Amino acid sequence: MEYRHSPVLLAEVLQQLKLQPGSIAVDCTLGGAGHARRIADSIAPTGTLVGIDQDDAALIAAADTLRLGQQIILLKGNFADLDRLLVEASIPYADAILFDLGVSSPQLDMPERGFSYHHDAPLDMRMDPEGGGPTAADVVDQYSQAQLTRVIREYGEERWASRIAAFIVAARGRRPIATTFELVQVIKDAIPASARRGGPHPARRTFQALRIEVNQEIEVLDGAIRAAVRWLAPGGRVAVIAYHSLEDRVIKTVFNELARGCTCPPDLPVCVCGRVPVLRIVTRKAIVPTADEIENNPRSRSAKLRVAEKV
Ligand SMILES: C[S@@+](CC[C@H](N)C(=O)[O-])C[C@H]1O[C@@H](n2cnc3c(N)ncnc32)[C@H](O)[C@@H]1O
């Protein structure tokens, strides 16, 4: 299968990263290399592009797409380990760093990856299947009812979270829930028929929640953004595209904290913490896709781009 992913907010990202020939750029979420290919063009012929992904399939496809004469370093890993990965890449600093969070279209569309409620497959959902971490089937099998409720409510924003969790616990007591379709059936049984009519697929929110939990997508963000900011050269920019309100909140919070500097209580007459701002927030309001982009690529609809510059 071809590794095809339409890059989201491409023109906006390229404009915001202020790339120049010779820039050192890091794409922490290479995916189908849609952004990376255009970044590589913008920094050619003397620039360096480091591309990171935790999914081997993405790296193999990117190696094909990015066959260029300039310096391109592709690394397999989780951006939670950004410091180690960039030391491995032997770059001194970065002028531009991009995070385009979440999953790629091919990951969602390859039935055997177990992300899709439209295809029957083992319930996996790991972006890095070789990493050995727990699968969605492990989460569904091992989490308590309270833990499942929390995950499905928080990460899926699913109003039927506690009923779905209760139905999962009852169903797994009869036999393990091992496949995507077995889980879809449990979710359909849990959501009243009247609530299932008309809306999106009833399993959409629960599948999203399990995917976020399996890949620890929210937990790794705060540390990764702080690491990225440390690697930026003065004037360098970090751009983050988030697709989930919780992700966007983490980005906003970290950016605001790093842009504020001083954390002393407001009633102290002088600063005693000594912290200085390390970031200038470029996008006070997040940049979102145009109606045209959403129509051409519905998966872009929840995207929010935030950009900050190292001072
Ligand atoms: C939305 S896609 C990126 C698409 C890419 N910008 C393009 O234009 O084709 C996200 C990619 O990031 C990867 N990814 C997500 N979280 C990651 C993490 N913590 N560490 C490394 N890669 C990650 C996924 O495997 C996926 O390939």
Image (cartoon, grey):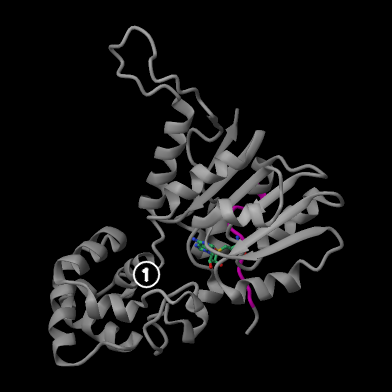
Name the residue tied to disc 1: 214
State whether residue 187 is above or below residue 296. below
Q: Position of residue 127 (x, y in %)?
A: 48, 72
* Residue at point 85%, 49% (across, down): 46
Q: Can you tell which quarter of the image residue 311 is in? A: top right
Ligand 1 image position (quadrant): bottom right
The residue shown at (82%, 44%) is 21
For residue 12, side relative to residue 176 (left or right): right
Give 285 or 107, whichever is nearer the viewer: 107
Q: Does any portion of residue 139 appear in the rendered image? A: yes
> Could you tell me which residue is drawn at 65 percent across and 71 percent down?
59
Dot 1 amino acid type: Val
In reply to whether residue 77 is colored magenta, the answer given is no
Question: For the view shown, which residue lies furthest in the bottom direction?
Answer: 175
Q: Which residues are magenta?
A: 3-11
Q: Main secondary structure of the magenta part?
A: loop
Q: Secondary structure at mark 1?
A: helix
Q: Is residue 10 magenta?
A: yes
